[in-house]
Image: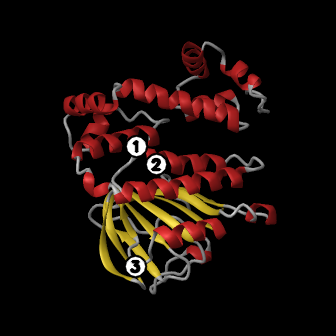
Amino acid sequence: MTHQSDFLKYLSSSENDEMWGVICTTVGYQNVSPHEQYPISDHPTDYNFTNQGRILDEYQLVYVTEGSGFFQSDSCSLRPVEAGTVILITPGERHFYYPNIETGWREMWVGFRGAHAETIISNYFSKEDPLLRVGVRESLVTLYHKIISYSDSGVRGSQQAIAGVISYLLGRVYYEHVNFSNRGNKNTDKINQAQMLLRENINTHLSPADIAARLSMSYSLLRSLFKQITGVSMSSYQQQLKLNLAKELLTTSTKNISEIAYETGFESVSRFCCFFKQHMKITASDFRAQHGILHKPNR
């Protein structure tokens, strides 16, 4: 059974997909609350942990963005995992990981295989050093969500589009990791976490004040730092997220306008349509028509 705060997707591939060099096998995320059983969702048998851990026949990048936990593998002794860490899982390597019972954690993951992926990882990463400190980066979270969007579209060519994102994700993880020690700015990490929370709660009513509380900051400080570091207010950033998601759904999905209004956090279709036209100077229906996307009729 899937937890309410989970997204899990397991993808199939064709011989044509295999020729691309990177094949996505799975993508998803889950929130694990303190003292909650882990893992909290059902996975196919090949992905389940046992008392001896598990062995996969693919690579995975598991990104922990909140909380803390532990990791161990055949080539790596038991080590703590902090928020802002990407765990590299390699094929054939027995491993296990789990959140700290007192903190829980939030994790995102993508699984993949292929000759191109093998070349990148064998030259730039190591199973002996699988915990990659990158910090909490909204830009990395965006890439995971881009993969999720393609995987959920059901459109021909989605495996090839995902392959491009995975290649870029590997590059960004490497870049963030090798430069991580040069940053050390806690305020930047806090704002990245705020950006991530705004993105992940785009269709809920989580307020900036709620985010400040989750980050153990005063609302006034968060608001000030957010504008200072990003150059825009939290409300402007939130509106841009909604607009970007709306445009993405209009051009890459067959969801109707009512469904898109709900997914972007609007209480009614009329509010969504007014918002979209105000910012794009064109109706959502005309925007979709210009991009030639087939869609369901509105209900």
Badge 2 marks a residue whose secondary structure is helix
Looking at the picture, tell me which residue is in the foreground, 199 or 226. Answer: 226
Mark-to-mark CA distance, 3 and 1:
29 Å
> Badge 2: how crowded within 10 Å, few (<14), some, or many (20+)?
many
Callout 1 amino acid: Met
Q: Which mark is residue 141?
A: 2
Q: Is residue 61 left or right of residue 128?
A: right
Compare marks 3 and 1 and give the one earlier in the sequence.
3
> Badge 1: how crowded within 10 Å, few (<14), some, or many (20+)?
many
Q: Position of residue 29 (x, y in %)?
A: 49, 56
The answer to whether marks 1 and 2 mark residues whose Cβ atoms lie closer than 8 Å is yes
Image-quadrant location for residue 74: bottom left
Residue 114 in sight from this viewpoint: no
The answer to whether marks 3 and 1 mark residues whose Cβ atoms lie closer than 8 Å is no
Q: Is residue 190 left or right of residue 33?
A: left
**Vertical position of residue 122 compared to residue 209: above or below:** below
Q: Locate the N terminus by quadrant.
A: bottom right
Looking at the picture, tell me which residue is in the foreground, 273 or 180. Answer: 180
Q: Is residue 252 left or right of residue 38?
A: right
Q: Is residue 195 left or right of residue 254?
A: left
Residue at numbered disc 3? 128
Compare marks 2 and 3 and give the one earlier in the sequence.
3
Callout 3 amino acid: Glu
Mark-to-mark CA distance, 2 and 3:
25 Å
Residue at numbered disc 1? 196
**Vertical position of residue 287 compared to residue 157: above or below:** above
Q: Position of residue 66 (x, y in %)?
A: 34, 55
Foreground tag (3 vs 1):
3
Looking at the picture, tell me which residue is in the foreground, 154 or 76. Answer: 76
Badge 1 marks a residue whose secondary structure is helix
Callout 2 amino acid: Val
Compare marks 1 and 2 and give the one earlier in the sequence.
2
